[in-house]
Amino acid sequence: QHLLTEELIGIHPMSSPFVEAIKVSWGVLAVLEENAVNLSRAWCAMDHAACEYFKKEYAVASASGIDDAVVLTMGPAPCDVARALELDPIDTDGLCLALQMQRQEQFPRRCLQICLLVDFSRSVTSNPRDKDMLAGIIAVEQ
């Protein structure tokens, strides 16, 4: 996403190919490295806003160790539901939530803190005009 203001001439960003893909997808998975740098980028805020606007899942993943990854989800993930059904096929609701919480406890604390403190006003773009354009769209779409 470099110089998108120029690439999107005549196209509203909410009609861009990327947003069109979000419309037909299950949602977006944001993969974070240790410092969650992508959350400081304005275009990532646009991704999140598009997911909220179109009622799509927005999940965040990060490494919790050398060989493990943890995904934060808005509700129980399919793996939580499947495990709950294995453990107790009759009373799965509470068990699904408990399994989700147990899975998400392993999410790296530093990434979680950054996720909770995202501030669009401090986000960056390579082109300042992109940020101005996105700020207007995000304000309207939310």
Image: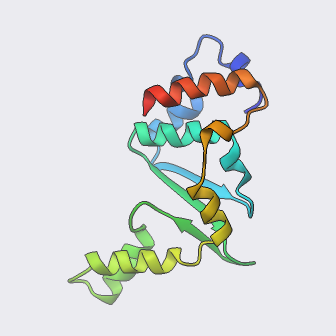
- Give how far across and how far down residue 39 sits, in percent: 66, 49
Judge by depth and name the residue closer to the eye, 21 or 28.
Answer: 28
Q: How is the image coloured?
A: rainbow
Image position of 59 with respect to 16: above or below:
below
The residue shown at (73%, 37%) is 124
The residue shown at (34%, 81%) is 84
Image position of 92 with respect to 112: above or below:
below
Q: Which residue appears farthest toward the left when viewing the image?
A: 90
- Residue 127 is at least partly visible in this image: yes
- Give how far across and how far down residue 103 sits, in percent: 50, 77
Judge by depth and name the residue closer to the eye, 69 or 38.
Answer: 38
Q: Quadrant of residue 76?
A: bottom left
| The C terminus, quarter of image | top left
- Give how far across and how far down residue 92 sits, in percent: 27, 79
| The N terminus, quarter of image | top right
Q: Total number of numbered labels?
A: 0
The residue shown at (39%, 64%) is 75
Q: Which residue appears farthest toward the top when viewing the image?
A: 10
- Residue 16 is at least partly visible in this image: no
Image position of 17 with respect to 47: above or below:
above
Q: Which residue appears farthest toward the bottom when viewing the image?
A: 87
- Give how far across and how far down residue 42 sits, in percent: 65, 37
Image position of 91 with respect to 109: above or below:
below
Is 58 on the left or on the right of 80, as rendered? Answer: right
The residue shown at (69%, 20%) is 5
